[in-house]
Amino acid sequence: MTKRKNFYLALGLIVVQWAASGSAGAMGEYSRLAIPQIKYRGGDYKPRPQAVESLLIQTAKRTSVEVKREFLELSLSSKDLFRYPFLYLAGNAAFDPFSSEELKILRHYLSYGGFLLIDDASAEVHSEFDRSVREMISQLFPHNPLQKIPKDHSLFRSFYLIDEVAGRARVNPFLEGVSLKGRTALVYSTNDLGGAWARNKLGHWKYDLIGGDQRQRKLAIRLGINITMYALTLDYKKDMVHLPIILERLRRYHSQ
Amino acid sequence: MKLLLAALGLPPDQFNDWEIHWALSEASWILPAMGVFFLLALWFFWTSLARVSSRPKKGLLFGLRVLAFVFFIFVLLQPSLEVKQKSAAKNAVAVLLDDSLSMSIKTLPTGKRRFDLVREALDQNPEYFARLKENYRVDFYLASEELHPARLEELDDPFKPLGVDTDFGSMLSKIQERYPENSLRGAILFSDGADLTQLPNSLSPDLEESITRFKVPIHTFQSGTNEGFKDLGIERAELADFGFVFQPTSVRVALVASSIGEKNIPLVLKEDNKILASKIVEIRPGQTRYQVEMTFTPEAVGKRIYKLSVPLFAGESIESNNASEFQLQVVRDRLRILHLNGRPSWDTRFLREVLINNPKVDLLSFFILRTLSDDVAATTGELSLIPFPSNLLFTDYLYSFDLIIFHNFKYAPFIDKKYLLNIKRYVENGGAFLMVGGDLSFQNGGYRNTPIEDILPVRFQSTPGEIFQESFQLLPPPRFANHPLFRLEKDAESNLRAWRSLPVLNGLNAGLIPKKRAQVLAAHSASGKALPVLAAMKSGKGRAFAVATDSLWNWNFRSVGQGGSGRYYQKFWQNLIAWLTDDPETRLIQIQTDKEQYSSGEKVLIQFKVLKEDYNPDPDRPVKLSLRSISKKQDLLSEELKTDARGEGVFEFQPAEDGFYSVKVETERDEEILSSQAEFRRFSQTLEFERPLINAYLLKKLAEKTGGLYQVLKTGVDWQEPTFPDRKRYADARSKTVSLSDNWWAYGLIVGFLFIDWWLRRRAGLS
């Protein structure tokens, strides 16, 4: 009887919520999560054109975050850049170095609250894109180099509990990042995350995984959602109120 | 002399002495300079007459020039003549009565106070003073850190010694200054010798020097002895300037004990009549000073007054030091804020960043990361999500929060509706509640006809609520230019510029209707309607606020993109939190005193200010100002006053006694009593009780080194009469000063001598 009551209650809540959100409509379009892709010179700035939309669809489906699914692309000099606190930079080949003005804008963007996810879609170790990215970051933060993100970082527990790093490929078993005043403002993946997320118009996976099974894709999607959640909630999951439960789950997770 | 006085128009018979004063007489260089100048002038005069062949003529001209020059120098030095009438007068004897606090200490075995022994001695020897007055002028002084002339018959009976800092060296210097020309021929000192500047059995070099300079006898009378001196007292309490509420704080207490024997005594710390801490102190013979550390936990914010006490034993010489009060400013350690977020968004993220980086805020935040309709595609064990502890938050811990924020938060199904009533009661009892807009807020959050709607400054038009999608600029209305919420910059012009520099907002919860008691601080006009954006309301003892948009984050990140910074966004939130948590700076009635502690005799300056609801000055507002002695739990006065044109007022008060006082100002507006309170303390120095023992050595030495007598006052025992040298002297009675240079004949003689010189040379055909 109790189970049935809970079921009806849950069903009722879902219906009410659907009705409420459907009728209220979106409020403040810019408050919804949109992830513009950075346009740059040289190379291919959108090697996985469906990647961001696919990630946003999964984010909307799995979490409470409201998203804006349209594909957006911006250059660093765009006046709309600061409307979007989350940027995605992807590629699979070398790209032209950013101008000093573009570097200045990006440095400003990241220092004052912006977040940048860089994704190497080449699936190669020490790729041309990788060289361009590292060169760009060394100019962007000369005194704050890329560092491996430790496994106890909030990125790995912002929604899912994750202990493996993967994308379409497994080039490196880690993420790298740049932290500014305790906040990780830049995350760099060399595993082609976008390739694992992207679906075609029929909803099928667009790219095959390299040397992995569907668990690898599942991990890549979960990592994408965690990165999104981290950008939106920062170190929320490190608040003391969450720690005991998370640590207990991690203990069980690792003991399996 | 008589001729000179007559020439100056002064009656010669009224003056019998005179003296000449010169200007610049204190400049040591002037005489040698004058000498050199005079010699040069002589040489010049003589050589300039070289062409005069007749020696008598040359001598005459030279003489005339020298005379003119001498008068010129005379005028330059501005001499003045002081004529005096001197008459015979008596030399003086000073009788110094030590009126320091230590003279109020009881002496054993009679139980009389030290000053009472002095009074008794004076009363019992009137003949001696009568005889003394025949030959000397006898001046009585009350002496401790200051010297006050006194008339014995006018002293209070019993007299209350209140001096706080006995210093014999300073006392001797001051008495000498009062008697120029050696007219003081001696002093009689009645004292306990308890000079705070002197170590036992020694004289400081400074005091030695003062005694040497005194040169006339000081007869010392010691009042009381150290025999059987018994005391247990609290010397002082030391603690930090402020403490945190519900956080243990410690106080270091210094105790003094003399002739108490071997006892274990309780040291008790109370607030009002509630014991907060107590400690047993083991008093042992041979040890006079004790340090005790006590820890207690303040239970309320504000200036709290605590009382320390030790038992009073029979026969104690000092009774007033067995209890001592002290004050502690108790503050909240940090503001505890509960931040509930209906979903992760840029607005919630940037606000969380502001709150978590504010060192004054203790933040507990919850984000609803998934709803019942979300398919997480994972087991619970693979998720970092935790159950929402609504029961704990809204029952057990509710009153530990200073502010609750519902940020685009729909309460169902996470919070049971019954807890909304708890939140309403929490606000009505003094809590603070803020709802920040978004599509999960207000009526869209399901709050229509709930206790939350009761406390919010807005009610809801319909469900679901309409969303206004356009962009709009938010500026503070001119009426609220002084409202603390809008204070981004200090001066009005910069402040308006700051608001104009902020990016536009987008998205607004429409369908919110301000309540009658609400204050709409900012609204946006659309379709002929004023849509409230920021609205505030007092609800019971607490405050509630509505922000009808979830796009304030634009003031942070987009502002950076426009060349600004997130500074104004942070300031806005600081202001809003300060208003919601009733920060003293945001109160409509404020009162303060110019100091927190006043020594006896000082006036307390009380200033108060009353503001209207829009934070503009409230002129001519009737206020009631009342003063209360906290220490005595007694109302002292109540005054009906009015604010001035600036909404301010002042009041002066002189506390009659030591202790803690509170001053409260209140006014009634719209059936609401606004009030504010400040506390202050009047205190007397108690250093005298730190070294209360009789210093016989000092009194003996003072007498011995000046050729005086040292005696101990004893009831019923005659004293050896002090004697003094030089009965008579001459003293000035009247004087008048006349300038000798500032008159017609001084200048006339100079001109006359020069004219004769010129006339003689002309007659002789000289140039």
Image (tube, coloured by chain):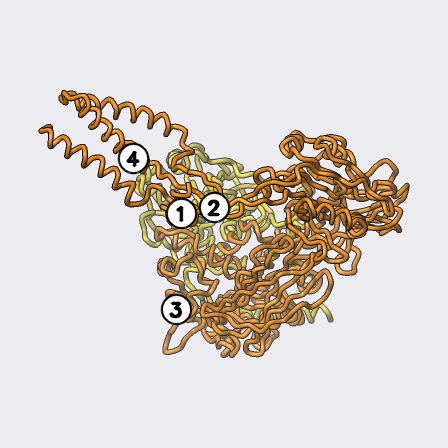
Please state the horizontal and vertical placement of residue B57, each as a whole percent of the image.
18, 25
Q: Is residue B420 above or below residue B577?
A: below
**The disc labelled 4 sits on which kind of residue?**
Phe
Q: Nearer the viewer, residue B692 or B676?
A: B692
> Circle 2 marks a residue in which chain?
B
Q: Nearer the viewer, mark 1 or mark 3?
A: 3
Are discs 3 and 2 both within one chain? yes
SS at badge 1: helix
SS at badge 2: loop
Q: What is the C-alpha distance between the residues marked 4 and 1?
A: 89 Å
Q: Which chain is yellow?
A: A
Q: Nearer the viewer, mark 4 or mark 2?
A: 2
Residue designated by label 4: B71
**The disc labelled 1 sits on which kind of residue?**
Tyr
Q: Say which label, 3 or 2, has the lower sequence index.
A: 2
**The disc labelled 3 sits on which kind of residue?**
Pro
Question: Residue B679 — which label?
Answer: none
- Is the C-beta separation of discs 1 and 3 under 8 Å? no
Q: Could you tell me which residue is drawn at 38 percent across and 28 percent down?
A: B29
SS at badge 3: helix
Residue designated by label 1: A109
Are discs 1 and 3 both within one chain? no
**The disc labelled 2 sits on which kind of residue?**
Phe
Q: Nearer the viewer, residue B569 or B490?
A: B490
Q: What is the C-alpha distance between the residues marked 4 and 2?
A: 27 Å
Residue designated by label 3: B478
Please state the horizontal and vertical placement of residue B306, each as a whole percent of the image.
73, 55
Residue B215 located left or right of residue A42: right
Q: Could you tell me which residue is drawn at 35 percent across and 53 percent down?
A: B562
Q: Say which label, 4 or 2, has the lower sequence index.
A: 2
